[in-house]
């Protein structure tokens, strides 16, 4: 069975309960490692894969208030300390999330609720560790607590129509724009703030941050751009984004 990029995107949710004993197979770790290397080469970022090889020993400790189980691998998302680098971290980080999902692994963007002392990672001068992404097998049954966290946080989801700024009705927008907006809505954002809108002007698409303040909005901008790209591609419209706020979506 072929799984499309859209199906992968639709299936993704933040994994907050990892299996205690099931480690990631060596073959998958190698795939993750070379995928990350490719992302770094393309972006100039410094993502790093960290793993634990001992059963029961976590590679990183996440806050028990939000997560359960043992995390045997994670990516440290390191990049420059400026808005465009943050946006790239979001864009390429979400590429990694969808790739891991395709490998059958659970993921979650975690920018705050982890123990920084539980691991070491290289951070070149002038750069910062923007976020981590735990990678691992989701627990067979999601515990009630983790289900509750998601339901509570996703309750604040904005209406799909609010994701697009255009001077025409949402229903009259091209299908690829509506599908792109749907992909943005389905995507992750820090504290589910959903701070990115799609602007549709004279047949062109731009991305705008409408809500600023938590310091994560440029990560969210990059994530939203990648999600939009996958949504549009599912309708046969391939394009690439210009980085930067109000950067345009260039159709190929
Ligand atoms: C940039 C970023 C940072 C995040 N940081 C955290 C975090 O520190 N702790 C946490 O539990 N979830 C964190 N999240 C996960 C979001 O809460 C989650 O993506 C959002 O609630 C939507 O839920 P979903 O991913 O299950 O669709 C973060 C998400 C993003 C995009």
Image (tube, rainbow, N blue to C red):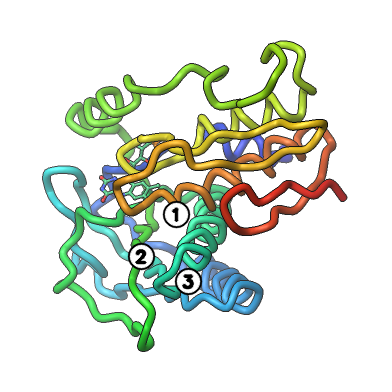
- As rendered, which of 136 and 200 lies closer to the eye? 200
- Quarter of the image containing the N terminus? top right
User: Is residue 34 visible in the rendered structure shown here?
Assistant: no
- As rendered, which of 15 and 91 lies closer to the eye? 91
Q: Answer above or below: position of 174 versus 194.
A: above
Q: Secondary structure at mark 2?
A: strand
Q: In the rendered structure, are the residues bearing label 1 and label 2 in contact, judged by CB atoms less than 8 Å apart?
A: yes
Query: Which residue is at 33% across, 22% downward?
Result: 156
**Separation of marks 1 and 2 at Cα, in angstroms:** 8 Å
Q: Answer above or below: position of 194 versus 99.
A: above
Mark closer to the observer (1, 3): 1
Dot placed on the residue nearer the N-terminal end, 1 or 2:
2
Residue denoted by label 1 = 219
User: Is residue 6 visible in the rendered structure shown here?
Assistant: yes
Residue 170, percent across and down? Answer: 67, 15
Side of 167 where 132 appears, left or right:
left
Residue denoted by label 3 = 26
């Amino acid at each position: 069975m072929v799984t499309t990029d859209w199906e992968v995107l639709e299936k993704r949710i933040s994994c907050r309960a990892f299996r205690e004993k099931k480690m990631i197979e060596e073959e998958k770790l190698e795939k993750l490692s070379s995928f990350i290397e490719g992302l770094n080469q393309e972006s100039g970022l410094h993502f790093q894969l960290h793993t634990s090889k001992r059963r029961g020993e976590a590679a990183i400790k996440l806050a028990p208030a939000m997560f359960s189980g043992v995390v045997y691998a994670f990516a440290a998302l390191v990049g420059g300390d400026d808005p465009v680098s943050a946006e790239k971290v979001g864009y390429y980080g979400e590429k990694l999330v969808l790739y891991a999902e395709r490998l059958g692994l659970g993921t979650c963007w975690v920018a705050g609720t982890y123990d920084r002392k539980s691991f070491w990672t290289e951070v070149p001068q002038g750069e910062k560790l923007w976020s981590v992404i735990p990678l691992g097998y989701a627990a067979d049954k999601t515990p009630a607590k983790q289900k509750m966290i998601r339901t509570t946080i996703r309750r604040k989801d904005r209406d799909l129509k609010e994701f697009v700024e255009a001077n025409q009705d949402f229903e009259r927008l091209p299908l690829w724009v509506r599908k792109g907006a749907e992909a943005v809505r389905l995507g992750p954002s820090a504290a589910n703030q959903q701070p990115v809108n799609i602007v549709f002007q004279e047949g062109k698409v731009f991305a705008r941050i409408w809500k600023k303040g938590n310091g994560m909005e440029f990560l969210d901008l990059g994530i939203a751009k990648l999600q939009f790209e996958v949504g549009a591609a599912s309708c046969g419209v391939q394009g690439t984004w210009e980085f930067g706020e109000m950067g345009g979506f260039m159709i190929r």
